[in-house]
Amino acid sequence: MSGSCATEKLSPWWRRASIVTMVFGLSVLILLTIKVYHEAPPVPDKVAGADGTVLFTGDDIRDGQQVFLRYGLMDNGSIWGHGALLGPDFSAEYLHTLSLQYATSVAQQRLGRTLDGLAPIQRAMVEAEARVALKRNRYEPQTGVLVVEPGFGDWFRNQISVWNVYFSSSVNNGGLGAATISDPAELRQLSAFVAWTAWASVATRPGTSHSYTNNFPFDPVAGNTPTADAVLWSALSLVFLLGGTAVVLLAFGKFEYLGWKSGAGHPHPGPTGAPVTPGQRATLKYFALAALLFLAQVLVGSAVAHYRADPGTFYGFDLAAWLPSNLLRTWHLQLAIFWIATAYVAGALFLAAALGEGDPPGQRKGIDALFWALVVVAVGSLAGEWAGMRQLLPDLWFWFGNQGWEYLELGRAWQMLLAAALMFWFALLVRALIPALRDPERREIAGLFLFAALAIPVVYLPAMFFNATTHFSVVDAWRFWIIHLWVEGVLLNSS
Ligand code: HEM
């Protein structure tokens, strides 16, 4: 806050620019999200082998997604590139091994040789046949049935033993602990989910020449190579990012009235010199909490890094039996969000008192209550993630345990409490800023301050627009809102 803020009125162009940016940005994002609802890869009602036997159903796929989430596997590996790097990309792994298996069986049938025993030209022919088979989309939207190529069914049936080996030891799975999942029914459901994600990543989207995921993951054996559009749009996005930044800098450098002050000259920020209010003093404990959370985040981050280097043992101690890598990675991400949010919430309360030039009645009590609400959310959700991953909350895992979506691992009930706490925080800011809103000199900056603050609880709401069985693509669209708009855009930029 500037010591001479009464004479340095904020330029109204800040408000106008914020509104234009928000309207334009949100319109594009809403359009893209609607597109995802319409164009997400279909989940078949039934997936059948070439002989007509049902391999798995749509319910198996949805149940498998829940297994994936309930056991925190998005903080071990990833699906379509979204998730962690300690384990594999499950969809890519399935696709690649299926492609090799299929090519191997073609090589055996046609030429009586293993893949490695083929001459380069023969191998090219065999792999081309495998690519054609993998790319062919045999899903019938009218019946909801997907009939897979001969050989794909055997590969699916083989998956339970593949995953059994994966989950059997920390060394294999990046520190998940031994026998994380051993129930054959759950392994079958997980396999159904992973097999479906592999299918969607390779089968040709009707009316196009690429897969439902734009040929992601890259896998030349399966015929997944980047499309021309993917290359073009990736390059264009960089050009627009750099070009847009240049335009903004040019405009601010050239036109004085776009700057911080509505008049000419530059502002000179400095301390207000006003005495610290009781409400401001009450924010001190928030900063102590943020420091503690940060320390905890760095410590668990270091343990995650250890798991990457040596997943089998922690200097001779079986850490994975107590604190598996996916739990620590979950805590690493959640703690980051908590300490940033705590510091931001406290900083805004401190500044609001400075801008409002004092505390409204009862403000300190409100600030204390909010602090304890944040402590409850942080401690409760971190403990819930531990209990959820240990499968101690059989029916309540989604609500109080580990919801499992990377960055949004905390249970839904904790999310709701967090959103309510943020609304309460906004109310505290409004109370503190009422005197500034009444003053024509300070109205503009107080209004913009509140506008930025309101975006925080509001933009968090998409985190609640899905559940554990919602289509993976749809959830990922909403996760994009949370990670890139809420965390990176609203929370970090508005501070
Ligand atoms: C000593 C400090 C830190 C260490 C050793 C550390 C370690 C790690 C490791 C090993 C991963 C990768 C896990 C994987 O393989 O998937 C990771 C991911 C991550 N860390 Fe840290 N970290 C540290 C500090 C921080 C801080 C201060 C922040 C943010 C405030 C942060 C935010 C993240 C995020 C967002 C990811 C996920 C990245 C992604 O998967 O896209 N880390 N960290």
Image (tube, rainbow, N blue to C red):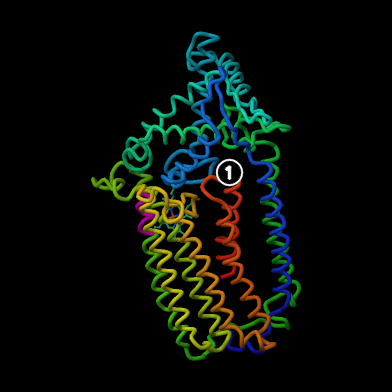
SS under mark 1: loop
Magenta-tinted stretch: 298-306
Q: Which of 251 and 422 is in front in this view?
A: 422
**Ligand 1: image quarter:** bottom left
Q: Return the x and y of residue 19 as percentages of the image width and height.
A: 71, 68
Q: Residues within 10 Å of mark 1 (few under 14, many from 20)?
A: some
Compared with 451, 156 (above or below) is above
Residue located 49% across and 51% down the image: 406
301 vs 452, left or right, is left
The residue that label 1 is drawn on is 471
User: Looking at the image, which residue sits at the far left?
Assistant: 316
* Residue 91 at x, y percent in the picture: 52, 35
Viewer-nearest residue: 78 or 474: 474
On whether ligand 1 comes within 8 Å of the CB at mark 1, the answer is no
Q: In which quarter of the image is the C terminus?
A: bottom right
Give percent across and percent down for residue 470: 56, 46
Q: Which residue corresponds to the image point at 67% horizontal and 33% vertical from the top-left?
A: 205
Most common SS among magenta residues: helix
- Name which quarter of the figure residue 385 lies in: bottom left
User: Which amino acid does the dot numbered 1 rest on?
Assistant: His
Looking at the rendering, in which quadrant would you find the N terminus? Answer: bottom right
Q: In this view, does 447 lie above or below 485?
A: below
> In the image, 63: left or right of 38?
left
Whole-percent x and y of residue 417? 48, 65
Tell me if residue 329 comes above or below residue 218 in the rendering.
Answer: below
